[in-house]
Image (tube, helix red, strand yellow):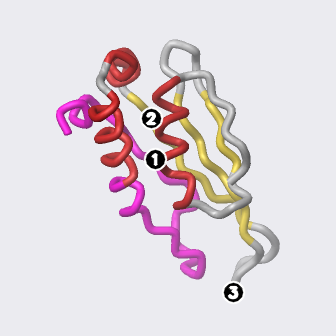
Amino acid sequence: MRPVHLRHTVLYDVAICLIDLFPSGADVAEIGVEATPALFVSWRTSGVANHPGNIGWGVHYRFEAQVLRDYPTLSLDARQRICDRVREMSRQLDFNYADPRASSLLVVDIDESVLAA
């Protein structure tokens, strides 16, 4: 994964926590409006059977406003638990590069339930 340069604390921490789950060439970006930014991880693969050329893949992490607002005030242990929870959610994603019906864009919604983790 390329160097991570994100302005929002929760996006930066989560990106660092997830860094090893994605290909080394993945791009990490902060997207969306400033009040509710999101994290987007994207990468390309070479062509696979029945798919000519490169295929773009991406994961869009959407954070509820409460998570973005409360995260900076939490203890380091609570922040780590949130990052671990998002990491566990990410492990459940299925990137089946060989399946022609596979979705190449996945969305992970991070709501206030992670604050109680």
Q: Which residue is mark 1?
A: 107
Is residue 56 left or right of 16 when viewed as pictured? Answer: right
Category of crowding for the residue at label 3, using alpha-carbon neighbours closer than 10 angstroms: few (below 14), some (14–19), many (at least 20): few
Q: Which residue is mark 2?
A: 62
Q: Quadrant of the C terminus?
A: top left
Q: Secondary structure at mark 3?
A: loop
Decide: marks 3, 2 in contact (CB < 8 A)? no
Decide: marks 1, 2 in contact (CB < 8 A)? yes
Is residue 86 left or right of 18 when viewed as pictured? Answer: left
Q: Which residue is mark 3?
A: 49
At a point 46% along the width and 47% down the height, the residue shown is 107
At a point 39% along the width and 19% down the height, the residue shown is 72
Q: Residue 108, image x and y in percent?
A: 41, 45
- Which label number is shown at residue 58? none
Real-space CA distance between mark 3 and mark 2, rounded to the nearest whole angstrom = 32 Å
First along the sequence among labels 3 and 2: 3
At a point 68% along the width and 54% down the height, the residue shown is 1
Amino acid at dot 3: Ala
Against 45, residue 32 (above or below) is: above
First along the sequence among labels 3 and 1: 3
Query: What range of the chain is rendered magenta?
Result: 88-117
Judge by depth and name the residue closer to the eye, 38 or 11.
Answer: 11
Q: Secondary structure at mark 1?
A: strand
At a point 67% along the width and 39% down the height, the residue shown is 4
